[in-house]
Image (cartoon, helix red, strand yellow):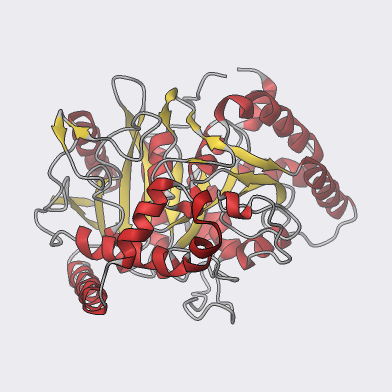
Amino acid sequence: MNKSEDIAYMSAYDMFDKIIRQELSSLEITELIIERIEKINPIINAYCTTTFDLAREMAIKADDAIKKGNSIGLLNGIPTSIKDLIATKGIKTTYGSKIYENFIPQVDDIAVHRLKKAGCVILGKTNTPEFGFAGATYNKVFGVTRNPWNLERTSGGSSGGAAASVATGMGPLALGSDGGGSIRHPASFCGIYGLKPTFGRIPIYPRDNVSGELSHYGPLVRYVKDAALMLDVMKGPHYGDKESLLDQKISYSDELERKPNKVKIAFSIDLGYAKEIDAEVEKVVTDSVYKFEELGWVVEPVKTILRPPRIAFQIIYTALYAYNLRRELKEGSSEIDPDLMSLIIAGQTYKSKDLLKAYYKRNKYFERMYRFFLNYDLLITPTTAIPAFELGVMYPPKINGKMVSPLAWQPFTFPFNLTGNPVASIPCGWSKNSLPIGMQIIGKRFDELLVLQASKGFEEIQPWQEKRPKF
């Protein structure tokens, strides 16, 4: 390992400490990562828009604040990327769509504003499928984002650019979004940590997000503490988001090391309905979950948890896309990805009674998870049913040699967009083909802290950061 690579793969909290002590300047770190982006991004295509001049200005400002003894934020001087679905003032935000190829917002999303206020250095925007609709990252504007561990595999979606950037040392922090697994899928496929907080924990304003009430913002990082720091910065209510939650007055980063003595974990390999799971994924996740017993916690296998929620999710998800993109459909339908067009058309076919029934089922899932968590503190599953699949397809047609439905590879993630629970994906092992495998940690509503504490405990028992893609 060389020194510059070690700095690029450094945790954000270590970077912050070195910047504060002036052992390294934010500008030095930023220049090093810019150099790395210029080298690696042409291969991976994680960044779709870079803002290097702005990043240098922000890094100099962060360094000056320290030299002058000014008050600074929790992430002062830390290089950060923003997913291209999230509004950034004065920076092109395309949503991965030809329709918005040259769109430049006039305001920052509130999450971006809070990251800037905390001192983050904005490196640019990361690639996403058009309007975030797919579980693989590709679009007509910028092309495909490749998996850092195997260039012929997908990085996942829709935060695939964000995950690939973090996995390759092209920035320690990335802001993503998750409407059905879009933080957790790419985190699992790229071998990093991703957190979808409780719905409303990080406010969204202006709410341009197409998947609306299913969508959560969250961090993609290499170290659990970095996710806690990002959550500390972005959490809290905002008057522009009626779904935003009151602040619990918790510092997730301060409380991270304090682990409860007694935690009861439910473990399900299939949630009671997933029909096909890759054998390596099943073995790696099953071996990993029992590592929590080293913390003195109880792990208990469970069977049926939910009735299959696929139909309710598909109806709500596709109906949201059909309604929220009605203007874009009218003005630029020829520019829309054909697979997205098929999704929109499907969403237009549902009647009001179909939607009401789907929302009724959604409420039932919410109640079921509430009752489930009266007896357990956490639920653990695989993140995805398979490691990263091949480039060029929306979903793998087969698992274990059997034909499967489009959502069969992701049965574990979207239910918790319906319920709004906080969920993390954490690396827990590798396939025989050296592809990362992720484990999903689901918490009670509002209990991001225990999800983060459990993640930190697992990270200490089975760290993953020393293994890096070869570039």
Q: Residue 168, position in %: x, y?
A: 56, 30
Residue nearer the viewer, 77 or 295: 77
Q: Is residue 289 above or below residue 44?
A: below
Residue nearer the viewer, 318 or 422: 318
Q: Report the side of 187 relative to 53 (left or right).
A: left
Name the quadrant containing residue 434: top left
Q: In which quadrant of the rendered image does the N terminus lie? A: top right
Q: What residue lies at 34% left-to-right and 62% top-to-bottom?
A: 318
Q: Is residue 350 above or below residue 411?
A: below
Would residue 453 be visible to someone looking at this image?
A: no
Residue nearer the viewer, 253 or 382: 382
Q: Residue 188, position in %: x, y?
A: 38, 39
Q: Residue 242, position in %: x, y?
A: 50, 81
Would residue 398 be visible to someone looking at this image?
A: yes
Residue nearer the viewer, 59 or 223: 59
Q: Residue 435, position in %: x, y?
A: 36, 26
Q: In which quadrant of the rendered image does the C terminus lie? A: top right
Q: Report the side of 94 relative to 464 (left or right).
A: right
Q: What residue lies at 30% left-to-right and 45% top-to-bottom?
A: 383
Furthest toward the right, the residue is 68
Q: Report the side of 92 relative to 267 (left or right).
A: right
Q: What residue lies at 79% left-to-right and 34% top-to-bottom?
A: 28
Q: What residue lies at 68% left-to-right and 43% top-to-bottom?
A: 49
